[in-house]
Amino acid sequence: MPTPYLPPARPLALAQLRRWPLRNNHTGTHILNFCLREVLGDHIDQKGSLVAPTKLRFDFSHKAPISVKDLATIEDQCNDWIKRNVKVFSKEMDLATAQKIPGLRAVFGEAYPDPVRVVTLAYSLDEITADLDNPKWRSTSVEFCGGTHVAKTGDIKDFVVVEESGIAKGIRRIIAITGEDARRASQLANESDARFERVSKLAAGADKEHELKQLELDLAAQAISVVRKDKLRTQVTSARKAIADAARAQDKEQAKAVADAVTDFFKANADAQVFVARFDDAKGNAKVRTPFPSLSLSFVCVRRARADAPSSLSPARRSSRAASTRPRRSTRRRTSSRSRPTARSRTSTRSPRPTLSPAPSRQRRGSPT
């Protein structure tokens, strides 16, 4: 079957495809700006922004890092605006009238034209200007903006915060994704959750510890929601800690069992000098292997302590060995600062140099006396 002819894409169609993610991210920036003010307070001021096809970046004034709890609230409120699917309105107004709208958001220090374009959510500009002093306009996003936007907030589909950081003193930065990129990030987070559930069902051991460690490394490189990443990282850390605590408790119990077996053996066999036994449960236990010379990972060999064993050394030999084990005192002579002579005292104790008289001048030969 012959391949049907497809005409080349027109530049206008390509431009429209590029503008779709830009519209999502631009309207998403307005929603984020409004939700930041609602959650963190009215001190939030825009310090910069970037609207790209793959992400949106928003810089704002805030003194402290945003907690994961507040980030979760901000992300939920942004997605709530998207689910409400409200209309996005835009209209040009004279600058003096637009500046009187309650809740207006604008970039501090920016020079705006007159008339200025105003973008709002849920309420039209005609409705707002009819009752300009109504405080309910603070419950929606009202901004000066000349960019492109979606017709309804539902076109954004999804909103995910992937990064929160500080870029300067008192300035924070949030990076978020929308639309298809946000959907893929949510799918990746779901796959990571399922992977953790699968690994958590494994029996405790080296394999489970390796899988959890690898999952923790993979999470650090994934561009998913910071809220879900923090939750999953906490779960992985708790699981790894539980494995480590159980291993330490088991090692301690095994070491105690070996020590008790050694003690009971020498109590029951007073003449025995060496204890050799096999402990299959003690394989890989550093606490069991390290204190005793082991023949293999599951064998323990212990020699009776010298205090219990009969000694063949003579009394003089034992006394010399005991003296050699005593800590030696430093033989370095210490001189206090008081007894140490200073430069002045040393010069004062020296005998004075003798004063030499000038030698008599010698007369030349032939000179008159």
Image: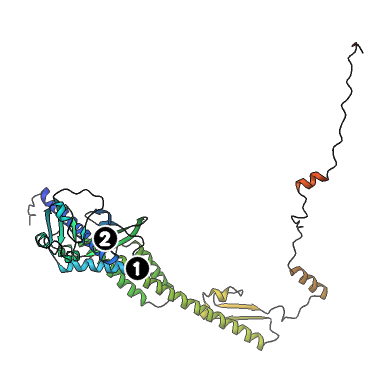
Residue placed furthest toward the bottom: 268
Reading the image, the residue beneath label 2 is 176
Where residue 358 sits: x, y (%)? 87, 26
What amino acid does circle 1 point to?
Asp
Q: Is residue 82 visible?
A: yes
Task: Please name whichever residue, 172 or 295, is drawn nearer the observer in this view of the structure.
Answer: 172
Q: Quadrant of the C terminus?
A: top right
Picture quadrant of residue 329: bottom right
Q: Dot 2, how many residues are within 10 Å of its Cα: few (below 14), some (14-19), or many (20+)? A: many
> Left or right: where does residue 18 sit relative to residue 240?
left
Q: Is residue 136 above or below residue 258?
A: above
Task: Please name whichever residue, 56 or 89, is drawn nearer the observer in this view of the structure.
Answer: 89
What amino acid does circle 2 point to?
Ala
Q: Dot 1, how many residues are within 10 Å of its Cα: few (below 14), some (14-19), or many (20+)? A: some
- Residue at left offset 17%, top offset 66%: 136
Q: Is residue 99 above or below residue 267?
A: above
Reading the image, the residue beneath label 1 is 230
- Residue at left offset 34%, top offset 67%: 67
> Left or right: where does residue 93 sit relative to residue 326?
left
